[in-house]
Amino acid sequence: MRRGLTGEYRITVVGGETIRAFVPEPLPPDPPLRFTPQRQQLLERATLALGRLDSITLLLPDPDIFLYAYVRREALLSSQIEGTQSSLSDLLLFELEEAPGVPFEDVVEVSNYVAALEHGTRRLQEGFPLCNRLIREMHALLLSRGRGSEKLPGEFRRTQNWIGGTRPGNAYFVPPPPDEVPRCMADLERFLNGENAPYPTLVNAALAHVQFETIHPFLDGNGRMGRLLIAFVLHHGGILKRPLLYLSLYFKRHRDEYYRLLDLVRLEGDWEAWLDFFLEGVEQTAQNAV
C-alpha cells in the first residue's frame, strides 16, 4: 500500500549548506497495515519457523555450546556488513588472548558485538525493559574499543549525520536533526513496550527496525544496533526464549533490495513490501539455523 511520505522534511543548515533532514512519523503506520491472505500465511510460516528455532534450546543436550558458536557467527556477519575482515578463528584467538591474523581493529569490532549482545540478553533475562537506556548500554559496549570509540559510545548523537555522500549536502539520505532524536527515540521506546503496537510481535520487530534505521540515533554503529534490535524485540515479546534470530546474512545477500525497501517505506509508505521481505528472511533464516 502506498501511503505517501512517512514523515516530513525539516530544512536545516549544516556546515553552511541548507539540507533536508527526514523526520519519521511515530509508529504504527497510518493507515494500518493491510494483511492479505498471502501475507497472513507468510506471517504464520515465519512464526512457525521461529517456534522451531526456539525449541532448539530445549532439545539440545548442551544448548550453550550451540549458542556460543551461533552468536559469534552472527557477530562476524553483522560486522562484515560494515566492512570488517575478521574470521571466526580470528575471534577465537582474540578471546584466548592470542594474536589473530587480521588487524586488531577488525577483530575487536566483532568482540564488541558479542559483548553488546550478551549484555543485552543478560539484562532482559534479569527483567530489565527493552528501553533506550538498554539500547545505549549496548551501544556503549559496541563502540567501547577500536573504530568508532571516539564517536560518543552510548550517547545519542548531538550533531547531524548522513548516509552516503561526503557531507549532508550531497548525501543519499539525511536522518532527523539531532534535536529531534530524543523525541523520535522516545516514540520508538513507547512502541517497543506495547503502546500503540497493535500487531503481532514479529510484525512490530519489522516496523521497529526500519524506524531505528531511519532515525539513525548514533554517530556510528546504527546498522549493527538495528540488526540486534530485531532479535531483542522478539526475545522481549516472548517469541524467543533467547535472542536467537539474526538476519545479517539475509540482509547481506539482498543488500540492494534491503536499501530499496527502506527507501520505499520512507518515500511512499509501502510498509507491506518491506514486511513481506522481512518475513521471508525470518522464515529462511530460522529454517537454516535449525
Image (cartoon, helix red, strand yellow):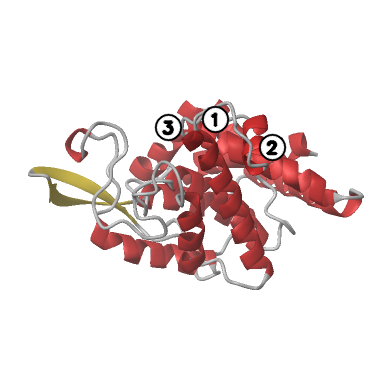
Q: Which residue is mark 3?
A: 260
Q: Which residue is mark 1?
A: 252
Number of the front mark, 1 or 3 = 1
Q: Residues within 10 Å of mark 3 (few under 14, many from 20)?
A: few
Residue drawn at point x = 21 percent, y = 36 percent: 167
Provide residue 246's location: percent of width, then percent of height: 63, 43
Residue drawn at point x = 7 percent, y = 44 percent: 16
Number of the front mark, 2 or 3 = 2
Q: Which mark is residue 10?
A: none
Res. 277 visible in picture: no
Q: CA distance from mark 1 to mark 3?
A: 13 Å
Q: CA distance from mark 2 to mark 3?
A: 20 Å
Q: Which residue is mark 2?
A: 285
**Element assignment for label 2:** helix
Q: CA distance from mark 2 to mark 1?
A: 12 Å
Provide residue 225's location: percent of width, then percent of height: 49, 49
Q: Earlier in the sequence, mark 2 or mark 1?
A: 1
Provide residue 209's location: percent of width, then percent of height: 50, 50
Q: Amino acid at mark 1?
A: Lys
Q: Quadrant of the C terminus?
A: top right
Identify the image quadrant of residue 99: top right
Q: Amino acid at mark 3?
A: Arg
Provide residue 107's location: percent of width, then percent of height: 55, 36
- 107 or 100: nearer the viewer: 100
Residue drawn at point x = 89 percent, y = 48 percent: 60
Q: Amino acid at mark 2?
A: Thr
In screen coordinates, is 254 left or right of 69?
left
Res. 13 visible in picture: yes
In screen coordinates, is 37 left or right of 12?
right
- 78 or 114: nearer the viewer: 114
Q: Earlier in the sequence, mark 2 or mark 3?
A: 3
**Element assignment for label 3:** helix
